[in-house]
Amino acid sequence: MKCKRCRRAEAAVDLPSHHAAFCPDCFFVFFRRQVTEGIRKLRLLAPEDRVLVCVSGGKDSLVLWDVLMDEGYETEGLYIDLGIDGYSDRSKEKVLAYAAARGKTPIVVELAKEGIPIPEAARCVRMQECSICGTVKRYFFNRVAAEGKFTVVATGHNLDDETARLLGNLLHWQRDHLARQHPLLPGAGGGLVRKVKPLWRVSEVESAAYGFLKGIDYVTEECPMSGDATSLVYKEALSRIEDRMPGTRIVFYQGFLDPSNPLRKGPEAAAPAEDAGTPRACASCGAPTYAETCSYCRMRERVRKARSLRAAGGSR
Amino acid sequence: MEYLTPRPGETQLFLGNTMYNELMITVRLPQKKKELEIPGPRRVMDLLAEAGVRPTTVIVTQGRKLLTKDHRVEDGATIDVLSVVSGG
């Protein structure tokens, strides 16, 4: 198969959803255009932004950092060490190696030192591991960004992630979640930093192909705690549909983002009651929150209590 | 007729009344810690079907090369099927 762009070189990546196949050089052009178009269409980033890129060591976040640096954005990487035996060490190694190769030193937050490593938190708090991890990560993304005077936080969520989330929200008619689901979450007063997902137009296959062809050494193993993640069920359903009807994912998501979509335009969507107004400072840590104390502090408190109960039980 | 035990990466075929060992395609699925031997030549998409892997969930590599789904893989080759699905 020949490259559909240059029509000379042998294709290395075939993309049925785009009716296209590309050689490595043309694929780089295509991929970067997909990302920059995604940024431009939704005005995710401005040239003067200071971008905090959240990197996990996986393909998407490292690819995102790579593209943003190549596009000339001022970026720094943030790695959160989740404290998962073995897996976190290997992920961190990949991040540090990639960053060093690009002359960068990422900011590292170690959850073990913060007193809330994910495996222990999951044992203490009766919540899904991925849900705990999401809450903790969002907290540190914002805290590090606000303290470091970053104007925006960028994460490597791709088209597959976003459509899986959309399908889950639709199946459960999570209207408030649907109203807020977007590649751009605007910042708010009180230190809530803008969050963006510049890879929203890019599929997981495209992101992996870009990482492989660029020689980015990313961690290929899956997080050992994500086996029961519901997002994987939605991803599988969507990938079955995509196999039979290439291009369905992007149509699904772009249709959802269309401003004429009533799910995104209804009065409840415009101003969900719990999000109304400006966030205030968490009574415990000072982070922006719409409640008395932020969800991170509430969770940390539950972990602390469970830990002391265990200690008391163990000493009897 | 001579019977030979195939070595890893080989299959037994008959040519006339002679049985001989033939090289096969080695399909490695590192994330599943699995390795398959499939007789070639075959297209990547056929190898994926044989391995029970959906094409939209993986990239397929041969050394430093990325393979398209219609790429023809010859006997004796080793390919890696890398899952791209991330959870959480």
Image (spheres, helix red, strand yellow):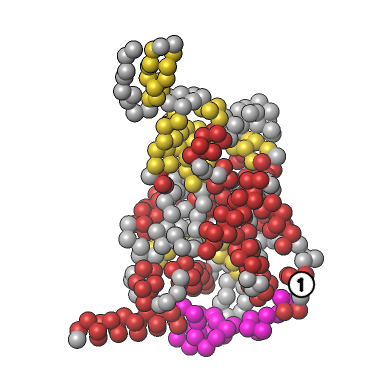
| Residue B7 in picture, x, y percent from top left | 32, 25
Q: Residue at x 40, y 83 (%)?
A: A301
Front in this rendered view, residue A23 or A286: A23
Against A298, residue A222 (above or below) is: above
Q: Does the magenta stretch mainly form a helix, a strand or a loop? A: loop
| Residue A233 in picture, x, y percent from top left | 54, 59
| Residue A197 in picture, x, y percent from top left | 60, 60
Q: Does A272 appear in magenta?
A: yes
Q: Residue at x 44, y 60 (%)?
A: A227
Task: Name the quadrant of the N terminus of chain A.
Answer: top right
Q: Residue at x 63, y 63 (%)?
A: A167
Q: Is disc 1 placed on a helix, strand or loop?
A: helix
Magenta residue span: A269-296
B32 on left or right of A273 = left
| Residue matched to label 1 | A265
The chain under label 1 reads A
Against A255, residue A14 (above or below) is: above
Res A35 visible: no
Q: Residue at x 39, y 69 (%)?
A: A118
Against B16, residue A267 (above or below) is: below
